[in-house]
Amino acid sequence: MDINFNKDVYCLIGNPIAKSLSPIINNSYYKIIGKNNIYLAFNVKEKDLADVINVFKILNIKGFNVTLPHKISIMEHLDSISDEAKILGAVNTVKNKNGRLIGYNTDGMGFLKSLELEDVGVKDKTVLVLGAGGAANAISISLAKEGVKKIIISNRTLSKAKILAEKISRKFPKVTSEYDSLKLKNVRKEKIDIIVNCTSVGMHPNIDESPINLHGFSENLIIYDIIYKPRRTKLMELAEKKGYYTINGLSMLINQALCSQEIWLEVEDYNFLKNYKEIKRILEIYVE
């Protein structure tokens, strides 16, 4: 890597970050577009967060991504926060604009962009979201903003599913929101158009597990599993045996990074699809 004094520095902070693919994605992007930038990753403990943010200001770090466990606590250290991030209650992207730190959240943007690239529309659809954590929150809110007809939140802990479903109802009264356990006893499966798995079930090392069984769903079902390691989860394997269309989490991972880049660089990437495909080709070397 060519190091010189003219590079703009971007980075990721979180704990742990050792297995993050973000440096590969973002540095590949800079190479593709010919930008003299560099993207690093820093393991930051919660107790050190405020000091690190101050150092970033002093060093004029141009922007940084935020992952667990800092996506909520980072908000108190920012000068302003986008409307999207306020609704979600979490920040994953920070831009340093002349010393002012502005927080954004590109999780939902990346998810919707990945659907767009797969030519999957969500307007007036019924979507079953598995999980009720941060990813499920971002994805559910983004789906509601895009005009889905109904969102059903299914989670192992029913109380968490209820909280997210009620949040959607308050923010988007035109969208019907319901909740259930992962057993789906109260869900009319044949009415579901899209399932989005936002749980960790099926991730390494428990690759032989699926969050739900797929009995009783319609033949046109689309399965989106946001897990990207492994690339083909047990849920996706079961779905493909039934002839369902499947999407894994690699697309969302890349697209949320590219959405962060558009915020940092303040320019729309008119070669988005081409650059996405090239980065995906590079990443497939690292993801089994």
Image (cartoon, rainbow, N blue to C red):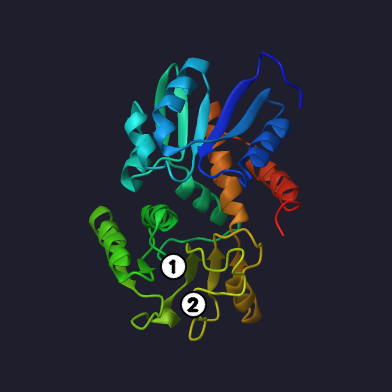
Asked which secondary structure carries label 1, the reply is strand
Which residue type does callout 2 highlight?
Ile
* Residue lying at 40% horizontally and 65% vertically, measured from the top left: 124
Look at the picture and state if 166 lies above or below 218.
above
Q: Is residue 84 above or below residue 9?
A: below
Specify few, some or many for label 1: CA neighbours under 10 Å numbering under 14, 14-19, or 20 or more.
many
Q: Amino acid at mark 1?
A: Leu
Residue 171 position (above or below residue 260): below
Local crowd at mark 2 within 10 Å, few (<14), some, or many (≥20)? few
Residue 113 visible in the snapshot: yes
* Residue 125: image location, x then y, percent: 42, 67
Coordinates of residue 274 in the picture (x, y in percent): 70, 43
- Residue that carries the numbered disc 2 in the rendered image: 212
When asked about the image quadrant of residue 51, the answer is top left
Residue linked to disc 1: 130
Q: Quadrant of residue 103?
A: top left
Residue visible at 65% across and 63% down?
Answer: 230
